Amino acid sequence: MTVDQMTDLIVARLLRDRGGQKHKWRKSLGPVRLYDRATHPHCNWALNPVGTAVEVEAIEQLADELRLAHPILTHPR
């Protein structure tokens, strides 16, 4: 899965589960950071969400869930 696909998946799930506006969730999500697999072999991505405490918690909980299914992301080609 690519970074762009993960971003789209997270936003879609947040919209479905929490409602709100797509633009607002994308802004709160921020960029997906990738790390080198040599130093992060089990999970190579992270988020640094911003927003209200409720928004940040929703994003972090979803990210934790999705890391189990998609621990390794790639750059889009």
Image: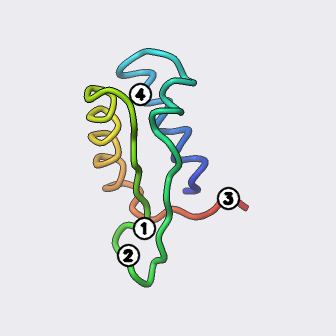
Examine the image and state in which quarter residue 70 appears.
bottom left
Question: Residue 66 placed where, x, y %?
Answer: 36, 48
Residue that mark 3 sits on: 76
Query: Mark 4 or mark 2, which has the lower sequence index?
Result: 4
Check if mark 3's residue and mark 1's residue have beta carbons within 8 Å: no
Q: CA distance from mark 1 to mark 2?
A: 5 Å
Q: Residue at position x 34%, y 72% from top? A: 42
Q: Is residue 49 above or below residue 51?
A: below
Q: Secondary structure at mark 1?
A: loop
Residue at image position (56%, 54%) is 3
Q: Residues within 10 Å of mark 3 (few under 14, many from 20)?
A: few
Return the x and y of residue 22 as percentages of the image width and height: 55, 23
Do callouts 1 and 2 mark residues in contact (Cβ within 8 Å)?
yes
Mark 4–mark 3 Cα distance, whole angstroms, equals 22 Å
Q: Which quadrant does the C terminus fall into? A: bottom right
Q: Position of residue 31 (x, y in %)?
A: 53, 48
Residue 44 is marked as 1
User: Which residue lies under the disc numbered 2?
Assistant: 40
Name the residue type under label 3: Pro
Q: Is residue 42 above or below residue 48?
A: below
Give the residue type at disc 4: Leu
Q: Bin the neighbour count of mark 1 within 10 Å (Cα to Cα): few under 14, some 14-19, many 20 and up.
A: some
CA gap between label 4 and label 2 equals 26 Å
The mark that comes first in sequence, 1 or 4, is 4
Task: For marks 3 and 2, give the CA distance.
Answer: 19 Å
